Amino acid sequence: MSTFFPMNNGEAVYSYSRNSQIQREVLDGAKEMMKESIIKNLDIKNILSSSNKFHITDLGCSIGPNTFTSMQHVVQVVKDKYHDNNLEFQVFFNDHFTNDFNTLFRSLPVDRSYNASGVPGSFHGRLFPSRSIHFAHCSCAIHWLSKIPKELLDKNSPAWNKGLIHYAGASNVEIVNAYVVQFEKDMEMFFNARAEEIVQGGMMVLVSPFSGWDSLNFFGSSLMDLVNEGMLDESLVDSFNVPIYFPSPDDITKVVEKNGCFSIEKIELTYPQSKLVDEADAKTFIINLKATLEGLFINHFGSRIAEEAFTRTVLKNEEISAWMKTNYKTCQLFIALKRK
Amino acid sequence: MSTFFPMNNGEAVYSYSRNSQIQREVLDGAKEMMKESIIKNLDIKNILSSSNKFHITDLGCSIGPNTFTSMQHVVQVVKDKYHDNNLEFQVFFNDHFTNDFNTLFRSLPVDRSYNASGVPGSFHGRLFPSRSIHFAHCSCAIHWLSKIPKELLDKNSPAWNKGLIHYAGASNVEIVNAYVVQFEKDMEMFFNARAEEIVQGGMMVLVSPFSGWDSLNFFGSSLMDLVNEGMLDESLVDSFNVPIYFPSPDDITKVVEKNGCFSIEKIELTYPQSKLVDEADAKTFIINLKATLEGLFINHFGSRIAEEAFTRTVLKNEEISAWMKTNYKTCQLFIALKRK
C-alpha cells in the first residue's frame, strides 16, 4: 500500500492551508532552535566557495502557509548572520507528485526574498543533483511512512493490528516494532539521498511531532462504533493502519549513525506552549487532524464512512477536551544535522 | 489588461495537453537546428568550470507533453556531445502562476534523465538567481504579449481596432505598430532578465510561430456574426484584442541589439512540413486554437459566447480548409543566442 495522500488541497473550510495550527505550533517552537543551530553551525564561506547562491529545500512542504514562514525564517537568519548583499537564495519546495502545487505557487508571498521553485517527488528518493543543497528543512513530515508494513494486515502474523488503526493503544509490541522497522527502512533511503544531495558542511534540520497522536484512537473508536452499528465491516478497520510513526531521539540517532554521513549537532525534545492544548480546544484539534488524514480515510473507507467517522469524532468533543486537559502535552523532536 | 491566461488545463478533450499539435510541429521543425546550434556553440567546459551541474529552463513550458520532448532533446544532445557520465542535469519548467503545474508534474516522464523542478512566474521578469542558467529554451511563447496596448481600445486613437480581434487583417498600420511597441517593451524586460540569469557562454534558443494566425480572423468573424444576430454587443468585440504578436527576424535582431548582452548565432525562418496543413485538417487546427485561446475568450466574453463563437468557427470548417490549401503555409522563426 502506497501512502501518497496529500494534505487536503485548495483553500476551502477543511483544507490543510486553513487547518494546520498543530503544524504551525510545532514550527514556532522550532524557530529559535533553528536560528541558534544556523548561527552556531553554518559556515557559508566554506560551503559556497566562490558562488553566491544558497540553495534551501523544504522537504514535504505541503501547500502553505507554514512552509513560507519557515523558508523566510531560514533566509532571514542566514542574511542576518552574514550581512552579505550579494547572497542569493533559491528555495526548492518539495512534496509528493500528488501535492497541490498550484495552490502552493499561487500562495507564494509576493515580498519573498528568494527565487522559488517546486520539486515534485518522494523525499525517500533522490530529488536534486549531487552536492547542490546547502540547507534542507523538513517539518512534520518524516513521521509519514512510505507504506504500511504488511505484517500489520496479516491475520497470521503476531503483528496483526486487529480493531485498531495505529500502534498507539496497541498492547502487542510486535505492532510497534513493525512500524519501527518500516521507519528505519524509510529513513535509510531518506538519509542516503540527502547525503548525496547536501554539500559538505551543509545542514539539515528535522522537526517532528512526538506525542499527541494518541488522539488517533478517537477516530479508531468512531470507526469501531460504526462496525458495532453494522454500518462498516470490521475487516475494513483491521486492514487500515495510519502510516505514521513518531520517532524518538534514539530512533533518529540510530538511523543517522547507520548512514554515517551526518553529525548530530543538536537533538532535543521540547514541550512548546500550545494554544490548542491550553484551551483544550478539541474541535480545532479534530478538524486539524481531518485536514491531514482525510485523504487517507477516504481512500480506504470511501467518503461516506470517512465523513461519518469524522462527525462521530466531533461528537466526542467533550471527552477529547477532558483527555487533552489531563493527558496531552505537545512535544516535538528537534534535530540539527551537519553533512560531514 | 493582464493576459495571464493559461492553456486549457488537465487532460480533457479540449485540453492543451491533448491539443498542441501545431506547437508540436513547430518544435519538431526546430529540433535539428537546436542540435546543430548546441554542437556548434556550446562549450560546457568553459561555462561549468569545476561544477558538473547543467541547468536548463523551458520558459513558458505550459503543461506538456511538448516541453518534455524538447527538454529530453536538449539533455540528449549535450550528453551525446560530451559523453561525460558525471554531468547532471536540472530542468526548471517555467510558466505563469496560473499554469496547471499539478498536471505538468504528474505527467513528468518516469524515465527522464534530469532532476525536475517547476518555477512559477512571468518570464518578462526575473525567475532565477544571477548567472545560474546554462541553457534557456522558449518555444511558442514569446509571441504572447504581457498586455494589450491601450490605444487599441481607445475610440479616439488612430490605433483603435474596431470590429477585429487582432492586427491580422487590420488595414490601419497604427494597429500593428501598437502591437510592435508592446512586443519591444516585453522583450526588453525578457532580455534584461535573461542577461542576468544566463551564465557567460550560456545559450538561449527561441522558437516562434511566424504565420498562420490569420486564422484568428475566422474567430473574429464568428464573433461579428453573433453581433449581427444581436447576441453580442459590438463594443465587446471592439474592446477585445488577442495579445499575440508574431515577431519577424528584424524585430528580434532589434531587441537583441538593444539589449547588447547576447550574440545571434543563428536566426532563420523555416517552413516545416505540417500534417495539419497538408491534409487541410481545419477541424484539428481550430480545436488546437481553442485549447490555446479559450481562457482568453471566456474571460472577456463569458463561457456561453466563447463556446458559441467556437461552434460557429467549426461550422466554417470547409471554408477554413480551402483557405489552408491555398494561403496557409507553416512558418517558424528559429533563433539561437549566446550570452556574451
Image: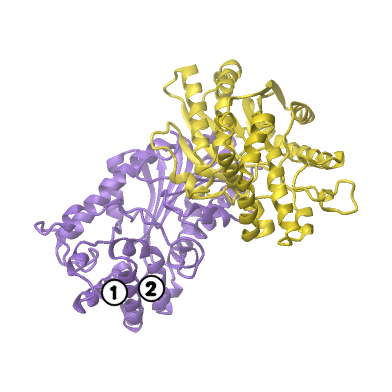
Chain colours: A yellow, B purple
Query: Nearest the camera: B76 or A8?
Result: A8
- Circle 1: element type: helix
Residue B83, how many percent across, how many down? 64, 45
Query: Nearest the camera: A205 or B68?
Result: A205
Question: Are labels 1 and 2 on one chain?
Answer: yes
Q: Against A188, is B206 above or below? A: below
Give the left or right position of residue B84, taking residue B149 as reference. right
Location of residue A38 (image quadrant):
top right
| Mark earlier in primary sequence (1, 2) | 1
Disc 1 and disc 2 in contact, CB within 8 angstroms: yes
Residue A300, how many percent across, how many down? 69, 57
Q: What kind of residue is marked 2?
A: Ile
Q: Against B291, is A175 above or below? A: above
Q: Residue at x 38, y 46 (%)?
A: B122
* Separation of residues labelled 1 and 2 (CA atoms): 9 Å
Return the residue at label 2.
B286
Residue A175, how many percent across, how many down? 83, 42
The furthest residue to the top: A40
Categorize mark 2 by other alpha carbons within 10 Å: few (<14), some (14-19), many (20+): many
